[in-house]
Amino acid sequence: MEFFEVINKRHMYRGNFESTKVEKKDIELMLGAALKSPQAVNEPTTSYVVVTDKTLINKIGALLPMNGTSTAPLIIVVLSEEVITEKGGSYEIENYIAATENLMLAITALGYSTVWTDGITRIPAINNGVREILNVPKKFKIRAILPVGRELEKTFQKPKPFYEQRVISNKFEVKNGR
């Protein structure tokens, strides 16, 4: 798929998935794209748990109150780790976000769909439950859970605000004294 076609097709899929498994070579391509994302000061802070075991998927799905998680043939859990740079900064949030976007674009390019769920990972019961199910060490923060698969019902990217509404050329115009 051509790059801008991928950008235009990428959307949040919140439905159920076909039972078709995600091929290992596709998983490797997806994670390869995530691993090539920009990482501040070349200090990788993002890791992944690739879940294909149906028992584990069902357990995670039981925790997440959303369609599709239990029917996904693959769940990718995005983790971050705080690493303090020489100058005292930490870029784990920026790194995980860049990696997750690369991951989602690769998922789309390969003909699969997903939804980026991260707000839900901040709910203590869900975070602790996923941590326990997957034996995630305490040094990692669970940042996002991405159910991945082929859409059961075709959906498309929702319209985004027009370019003119979101992109300012050079500077804001002052109108009516404001």
Image: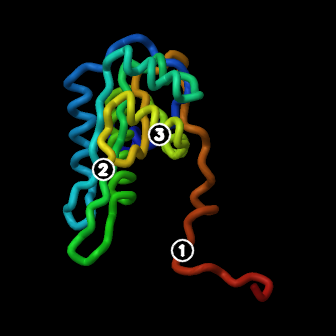
Please tell me whether residue 103 is drawn above or below residue 85 in the rendered image. Answer: above
Q: Considering only order in the chain, which callout, 3 or 2, is on the residue closer to the N terminus?
A: 3
Contact (Cβ within 8 Å) of mark 1 with mark 2: no
Within 10 Å of the Cα at label 2, are there few (<14), some (14-19), or many (20+) other Cα atoms?
few
Per the image, the residue denoted by label 2 is 139
Q: Are marks 1 and 3 in contact (CB under 8 Å)?
A: no
**Colouring rule applied to residues:** rainbow
SS class, disc 2: loop
The residue positioned 44% from the left and 13% from the top of the image is 18
Q: Residue at x 54, y 29 (%)?
A: 64
Q: What residue type is labelled 2?
A: Lys
**Total label count?**
3
User: Marks 2/3: CA distance?
Assistant: 14 Å
- Amino acid on which disc 1 is placed: Ser
Which class describes the residues within 10 Å of circle 1: few (<14), some (14-19), or many (20+)?
few
- The three-letter amino acid code for the residue at tag 3 is Asn
User: In the drawing, what numbered circle is on residue 156?
Assistant: none
Snapshot quadrant of residue 51: top left
Q: Mark 3 points at which residue?
A: 127
